[in-house]
Image (cartoon, rainbow, N blue to C red):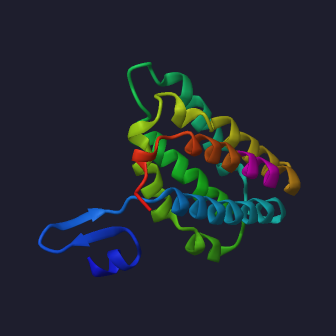
Amino acid sequence: MRQLEGQGLVSIQRFRGASICHLTRAEIVDLLEVLEQLVILAARLATQSATSKTPLLQIAVQLGDLRPSVSAKSRIGPSGHALRNVFYVRLLEASGNSELIRAVPFIRAELLRAQVAPHLAIEHPFAHAADYLAIAQAIVDARADAAAEAVSAHFQATRIFLSAMPDHIFAPT
């Protein structure tokens, strides 16, 4: 538990146990900044890599295909979240740089998703489906600048969305 606390994943309260950490707005801004730069790097490297990009494009298409199957009364299921995670893993693999997978703070990103997911509109998890397809298509087409721009647009949309969320969702500063 102390190791998880040191990684900023849990908060230990004496005589009360432990709880998963909530991120502040500032921590989320910092996390998104780091994630954006790492994903841009991965996308640029992927356009030049000899690694197959077909799995990346297939995942992006599958994410887009999930969108119409979500009814007005349901939310994205575990398979949709897992598919989004697979997209990022495939993107990092397509970069051909094995260190990028170790460098990306996946666990912190999952904390962010877990923190805001209960407050999302039902259709929101699929709002980025077109972004994933644009990123993947630019990579497959070996257009590094277009891939970087698609990643930046995706993260900018995420920032705008999060800035509109109410304060009670975030940890106090």
Number of numbered markers: 0
Left or right of 58, for residue 149 = right
Is 97 left, or right, of 30 in this rendering? right
Q: Position of residue 141 (x, y in %)?
A: 85, 48
In the displayed structure, would residue 123 be above or below residue 134? above
In the rendered image, the vertical position of residue 61 relative to residue 101, given as above or below: above
Q: Quadrant of the N terminus?
A: bottom left
Left or right: 153 in relation to 63: right
Q: Give whichever of 34, 15 is nearer the camera.
A: 15
In front of the other: 109 or 17: 17
Residue at the outermost front position: 173
Q: Position of residue 45 (x, y in %)?
A: 78, 66
Q: Name the residue located 60 percent from the left edge and 33 percent from the top edge.
A: 127
**Is 108 included in the stretch rendered in magenta?**
no
Horizontal and vertical percent position of residue 39 = 68, 61
Q: Residue at x 55, y 22 (%)?
A: 68
The secondary structure that dominates the magenta segment is helix
Tell me if residue 115 comes above or below residue 50 in the rendering.
above
Q: Choose top left, top right, bottom left or bottom right for residue 53.
A: bottom right
Q: Give the image quarter of residue 23.
A: bottom left
Residue at the left extreme, as displayed: 15
Image quadrant for the C terminus?
bottom left
Please give the name of the residue rendered at 51% of the width and 40% of the height, measured from the top-left corner.
165
Magenta-drawn stretch contains 149:
yes
Bounds of the magenta segment: 147-153
| Residue that sits furthest to the top in the current view | 72
Tell me residue 30's x, y (percent): 59, 64
**Between 128 and 43, the one nearer to me in the picture:** 128
